[in-house]
Amino acid sequence: MNYKEALAIAIEIQSFYIPYAQEIDITGSLRRKDYIITDIDFVIMLDSKPEEFYDVFLKLAEYFALKKSTDDVKVKVWYGEPDNWGFLLAKTTGHFHYTPYELENLWVTQGYEEKDEYLYKGDKMISISSEGDLYRLLDLPFVAPWFNGFENS
């Protein structure tokens, strides 16, 4: 699916989540402004965390994506908190020079590991509230993920 079609679907899905979210970001290939989009990713911080909302939101996100799309576009949702917000943004979007998989390889080679959507060094959880926190930790410059040399808007 092209960028503009996927963005329209993402914005519609995002509008449904907004009343329940303290913060919500569209991430992944849409955030990078890739030309071809195969999935729509969200990182959401709910105002409250009632367990019943999780399944409802996932089902509605899938419903909207399938109903509006003629392509097989999947919707992925990560639920963040202040201590892992930046980590989830980086993990789901990547970095200007690194795919999400390459970024993960960087933190692993530096002795960090991911546990339950948080970054740890040994038994110590590392608070990563912004992408800049992660990039400083990995000794990388922060470059906005959408700064890829192309304009899609």
Image: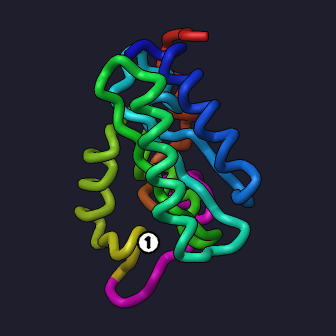
Mark yes or no: residue 93 visible: no
Residue 133 included in the magenta stretch of the image = yes
Vertical side of 93 occupied by 9: above or below: above
Rendering coords of residue 81 (x, y %): 60, 69
Vertical side of 45 occupied by 1: above or below: above
Residue 34 included in the magenta stretch of the image = no
- In percent of the image, x 45 and y 51: which residue is there? 59
- In percent of the image, x 54 and y 52: which residue is there? 43
Residue, disc 1: 118
Q: In terms of depth relative to the viewer, which is nearer, 28 or 12?
A: 12
- In percent of the image, x 37 and y 74: which residue is there? 116
State which quadrant residue 129 falls in: bottom right
Query: Magenta span covers which residues?
Result: 122-135
* 121 on left or right of 109: right
* 31 on left or right of 67: right
Vertical side of 22 occupied by 99: above or below: above
Numbered circles on residues, count: 1
Rendering coords of residue 120 (x, y %): 39, 77
